[in-house]
Amino acid sequence: MEGADEFTKYRSPLVSRYASKEMAYNFSDRKKFTTWRKLWIYLAKAEKALGLPITDAQTLEMESHAEDIDFAMAAEEERKLRHDVMAHVHTFAHCCPTAAPIIHLGATSCYVGDNTDLIMLRDGFNILLPKLARVIDRLANFAESYADLPTLGFTHYQPAQLTTVGKRACLWLQDLVMDMRNLQRARDDLRFRGVKGTTGTQASFLQLFQGDHDKVEELDRMVTEMAGFKKAYLVTGQTYSRKVDIDCLSTLASLGATVHKICTDIRLLANLKEIEEPFEKEQIGSSAMPYKRNPMRAERCCSLARHLVALMADPLQTASVQWLERTLDDSANRRISLPESFLTADIILSTLQNITEGLVVYPKVIERHIRQELPFMATENIIMAMVKAGGNRQDCHEKIRVLSQEAAAVVKQEGGDNDLLARVQRDPYFTPILGQLDNLLDPKTFIGRAPQQVKQEYFLFPPTCRNERKGEINLSLQPESPQHRVSTDVVFSLQILNNFTL
């Protein structure tokens, strides 16, 4: 019956339906409360090393039970005490009777709560960064493959000057590499709350060490280092500044905006039948219309990206209402907004990787759309050619204007094809340039430097960098992170980012 019970209560789709196992674990109770215990162990070890009467037997006992959590007991303790940290102190103490007197010594609840949140944020970024890098890598390959394929550009979602399929993908890439920079910056800017006491003054630890300021500072440094951070925040209240949450979630919200734009573009192009996301052999597009190939992956990304962007309001409002050294009205909100932001970013990146690995391009459809619009776009070229052949610019402009309006009427009022070129060919006025029309209407003469821009912006890095993408290397990620080895896609994406700043 236990298995059936899970279907009688709400489950967040972010975990039950979408997010990866590693990101779901990162914000799980198991990760959270084992981290609390690790933090208590770090604190005890550092306090012992600095002279407090803590024994090896006590720290060894704590270490032996670091993963041995009785969640039922902790829940019962919290029901009685109405305090989650003290519930887990009691639960830990129950299986560590020798160490019980020194667990949480000198600390406040935020010692485990806030420091664990910072570890989860750091590890969350370490999960996201390789996924973002892989998306950048796949999209860079796509851009390179289609660097020279002309396609209609659109402004105001109206046909405009031609670009190339690859150049358009570079618009998406540029935003993604900016997101890569932002995520790395947010991760690298994270510091540890450290050992700061109830209101951030470290008064309890100063008392423990009988007024020895150097030992208090060393305690903070030691615990920070044990937790895998290079630096701790110099100043905190009871909590670390909630502006840190703003910095983290704003980068994810910005990523959400990027992904929404990319996937909206793909949906628009799918409607034109120029580009489609992957479609499985047995996939069903519609229960009522079996012929449909709906862009459901791109739609999912847009749907979740909106949620990711909307979550940004939470840390902004939370930071603004933290009175003096802190208020507890941040807690319930952060239990939701922090995990959901990372879980949402995780699934949109995984889905976007799937899309970018299997984008399908239909060159013949693109070519047909170009043929429908290119005659109008070529009118300036036709005028210039006539002037070179001895014609009068104003006379030619008037001729083209009249013929263009006639052709537009056929397209808009009669539903016919654009016959401007045929009208030009029939008009004796344009006889001097009839032999040039094919060249004047060659789509490749309308794409400017689009192919060169693709190559210039994205492929000016050493060939060895691209070869290395096939393997793995160690990056300087934090030692506590489960992502201590990540794909060299990260290195590749950083090289792309550097090229953008040339």
Image (tube, grey):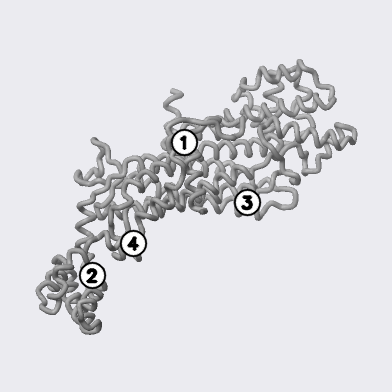
Marks 1/2 in contact by CB < 8 Å: the verdict is: no
Considering only order in the chain, which callout, 3 or 2, is on the residue closer to the N terminus?
3
Position of 129 compared to 327: left or right? left
In which quadrant is the N terminus drawn? Answer: top left
Q: Give the vertical position of 234 relative to 380 (above or below).
A: above
Position of 71 compared to 365: left or right? right
Disc ID at residue 318: 3
Kindly report the distance in space between the C-alpha atoms of the residues bearing marks 1 and 2: 51 Å
Marks 3/1 in contact by CB < 8 Å: the verdict is: no
Considering only order in the chain, which callout, 2 or 4, is on the residue closer to the N terminus?
2
Position of 320 compared to 304: left or right? right
The residue beneath circle 4 is 448
Amino acid bearing label 1: Val
Marks 2/3 in contact by CB < 8 Å: the verdict is: no
Q: Position of residue 116 (x, y in %)?
A: 64, 35
The residue beneath circle 1 is 15
Furthest-top residue in this view:
57
* Disc 2 crowd, CA 10 A, few/some/many (<14, 14-19, 20+): some
Between residue 275 and residue 331, name the one nearer to us.
275
Q: Give the vertical position of 394 relative to 481 (above or below).
A: below
The residue beneath circle 2 is 376
Closest to the camera, between mark 4 and mark 1, is 4
Kindly report the distance in space between the C-alpha atoms of the residues bearing marks 3 and 4: 49 Å
* Disc 4 crowd, CA 10 A, few/some/many (<14, 14-19, 20+): few
| Callout 4 secondary element | loop
Amino acid bearing label 4: Gly
Between residue 133 and residue 410, name the one nearer to us.
133
Considering only order in the chain, which callout, 4 or 3, is on the residue closer to the N terminus?
3
| Callout 2 secondary element | helix
